[in-house]
Amino acid sequence: MRVLVAGWPSFLHGEATAGDVLAMEAVRRGLADAGVACDLVWSPVFRPDGLGLEQADPGRYTHLVFACGPLSGPQIEELHRRYARCVRIAVGVSVLDPDDPAVKGFDTVLARDAPEAVPRPDLAALAATPPAPVVGVVSAPGQAEYGARRRHSGVQRELTAWLAARECARLPLDTRLDPRDWRMFGTAAELESVVRRLDLVVTTRLHGLVLALKNGVPALAVDPVAGGAKVAAQARAWSWPAAVTVRGTATPLLDPAELDRWWEWALSPDGRARACAPPPTDTMVAELLNVLGG
């Protein structure tokens, strides 16, 4: 027996949701624990290095298992044609119409929900996942005031490409407040409440750095202005070492090895302890009061 496990993340024009992927993994883990050989098949868009349907020779498999999602549409019907010689089983799926050809093509359907059937728990709940650091990403706008020294677009391109390759849960954050838009924070307290729950902040913005350290969260700060400007200056004011300045006109603007090094440090116990240190003291408000007092 050899099983090919498929789902909506297997199709070139399908959709890879976290739930679908976890359901496929739950099936794989269950089969592996039972000593059943299996392969998972992936869309080349989602996992370019994975096994694709074009490479999954129907002659290699005795069974096809389709996990999760709705049983409907031509893509599933094509699976029935391609793997016609396999025993075909659907598990953890939604059945909208029992007479749909996509449904009737399976030898067995173990539905999570179907007309007049008692619903069953979704398979995604069975798959264990390792923890990943939760990383807030706070990006600066173009900041035209820095003129020819601006490297914002290039830094953003390189930094986000580097971040995309990291194993982490990325959370884009904006320090701009707008109570009219439900997607934005309406108050600084709302933003800081999210920041406190992060493991790390990666930022090209001064207040991304400040609000992270204020709330005891390590930051990896990148100053997007050639030669350094206010982000680098603020890192010095806080004696915060995990700050990178762009290379000026050289390309690439950022050194991935340097980013890697500060990433590891910021997520280490040393980085967390340094971020939890008391904020620097300053007399600026007292100086203001002296000025106002004449």
Image (spheres, rainbow, N blue to C red):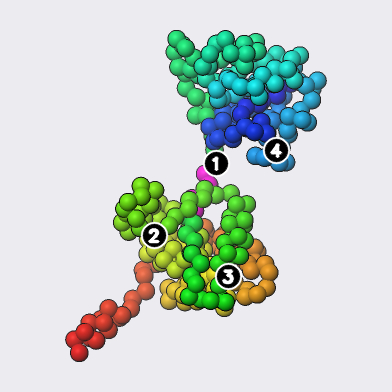
Of marks 4 and 3, the one in the foreground? 3
Q: Quadrant of residue 86?
A: top right
Of marks 1 and 2, the one in the foreground? 2
Q: Which mark is residue 44?
A: 4
Please indicate whether residue 223 sits to the left or right of residue 247 in the image.
Answer: left
Q: Which mark is residue 130?
A: 1
Mark 1 → mark 2, Cα distance in angstroms? 33 Å
Local SS, label 4: loop
Q: Which residues are magenta?
A: 131-135
Closer to us: 146 or 23: 146
Q: Are marks 4 and 1 in contact (CB under 8 Å)?
A: no
Local SS, label 2: loop
Amino acid at circle 2: Arg
Looking at the image, is 249 positioned above or below residue 76?
Answer: below
Please indicate whether residue 192 sits to the left or right of residue 94 in the image.
Answer: left
- Which comes before the other along the chain, label 3 or label 1? 1
Amino acid at circle 3: Arg
- Which comes before the other along the chain, label 3 or label 2? 3
- Which comes before the other along the chain, label 1 or label 2? 1
Mark 4 → mark 1, Cα distance in angstroms? 24 Å
- Which comes before the other along the chain, label 4 or label 2? 4
Mark 4 → mark 2, Cα distance in angstroms? 37 Å
Amino acid at circle 4: Pro
Q: Which mark is residue 176?
A: 2
